[in-house]
Image (cartoon, rainbow, N blue to C red):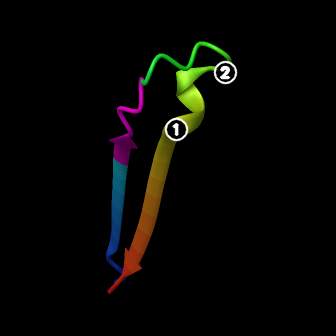
Amino acid sequence: MALFIVEMALVLSGRDSGSAVGPSRQSTALRFRVYRV
């Protein structure tokens, strides 16, 4: 049997220095890691 461990972490960068020129959603980093045991 193979055990799959999926770890997903959502990291939000709070860089709201009044930059209303671009969307703040761009500073959102998504980490997706898959481990196979």
For the point 36% across and 44% down, which residue is it? 11
Of badges 2 and 1, the one in the foreground is 2
For the point 33% across and 60% down, which residue is it? 7
The amino acid at mark 1 is: Ser
Of the pair 32 and 20, the residue shown nearer to us: 20
Of the pair 25 and 37, the residue shown nearer to us: 25
Disc 2 to disc 1: CB gap under 8 Å? no
Of the pair 20 and 7, the residue shown nearer to us: 20
Report whether 16 appears left or right of 23. left
> How far apart, in angstroms, are the residues tagged by discs 2 and 1?
10 Å
Quarter of the image containing the C terminus?
bottom left
Of the pair 37 and 11, the residue shown nearer to us: 11
Residues in magenta, as a range: 10-16
Report whether 34 appears left or right of 22. left
Mark 2 Cα shell of 10 Å, populated few (<14), some (14-19), many (≥20)? few
For the point 38% across and 77% down, which residue is it? 35
